[in-house]
Image (cartoon, rainbow, N blue to C red):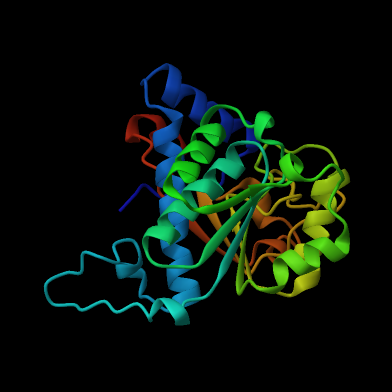
Amino acid sequence: MTCRLRPLSRQEVRELDVRAAEQLGLPTLILMENAGRGAAAWLVELAAGVRSESAARPFSAPPSTEIELPPAAALPRVLILSGPGNNGGDGGVVARHLDAWGFAVRIVWFANREQLRGDAKTQWMILERSGVDQTAWFHSQDDDPRPAELDSLIADADWLVDGLLGTGLTRPVEGALRTVIEAMNRSNKPILALDVPSGLDADTGMPLGTAIRARATATFAAPKLGFAGAGAVAFTGEVAVIDIGLPRALLKQFLA
């Protein structure tokens, strides 16, 4: 159980992260781990039908409950599309947990490996050492992805996870990431967005040029201010708030 928070602005979310690290010494890597694992657990519920009270702990059922995931061959195939920042790192955590739970999962980073920094780079290194299927697009390709290439990439997946852009976006999406967003929407595959659908303004709920149209959004710590905006639900789909382990001392001023 976690505190119920009012919707937060982009700046309030950023301040929470900064205060957690600087005032409390809470590593951002821990917050990322909690966020990604919670999102992965909800995806298990959405895509594989595991009950919500069980999805977060598929290998530790309560004594009175038996949890049965389908055989690995019957589990949905998941493709995670990540950007070079922390939202992409969240996608890396999702990939690790889905892999551990028996899902066929692949993560494609729309970045060069050398672009990855901080917690996102840490996730890349863990995935690499764990043998999870991952690719950095611009490490192996010289050009921006073409629509046909993205359509082929996405074709074999049953679910997509959007880890391209986070709450910090304030200007229209351009270039390769715009092309990726358009391909994801064009695929008509169900999409789980991490924290906020990529391209959606977290404060206004308006698309910044273009935005992911998600089946569901796993948003971290609190709803975002823009989710209540007119028309935002067409991009967010169903929203679930994922507890990322921020201490109550930081949250009490934002209680609903």
Q: Nearer the viewer, residue 54 or 141?
A: 141
> In this rendering, is residue 8 above or below 23?
below
- Going 45% across and 64% down the picture, which residue do you hit? 42
Tell me where residue 232 appears, x and y as whole percent: 72, 60
> In this rendering, is residue 144 above or below 186?
above
From this viewpoint, which residue is outermost toward the left? 63
- Would you say 58 lies left or right of 223 here? left
Q: Nearer the viewer, residue 192 or 219?
A: 192
- Going 13% across and 77% down the picture, which residue do you hit? 64
Q: Can see residue 242?
A: no
- Going 83% across and 38% down the picture, which residue do you hit? 171
Quadrant of residue 159 in the image? bottom right
Q: How many marks?
A: 0
Q: Can see residue 103?
A: yes
- Would you say 57 lies left or right of 91 here? left
- Would you say 159 lies left or right of 93 here? right
> In this rendering, is residue 101 above or below 26?
below
Tell me where residue 55 appears, x and y as whole percent: 35, 67
Q: Nearer the viewer, residue 174 or 102?
A: 102
- Going 25% across and 65% down the picture, which residue do you hit? 59
Tell me where residue 170 appears, x and y as whole percent: 78, 37
Q: Nearer the viewer, residue 232 or 196?
A: 196
Tell me where residue 9 appears, x and y as whole percent: 62, 38
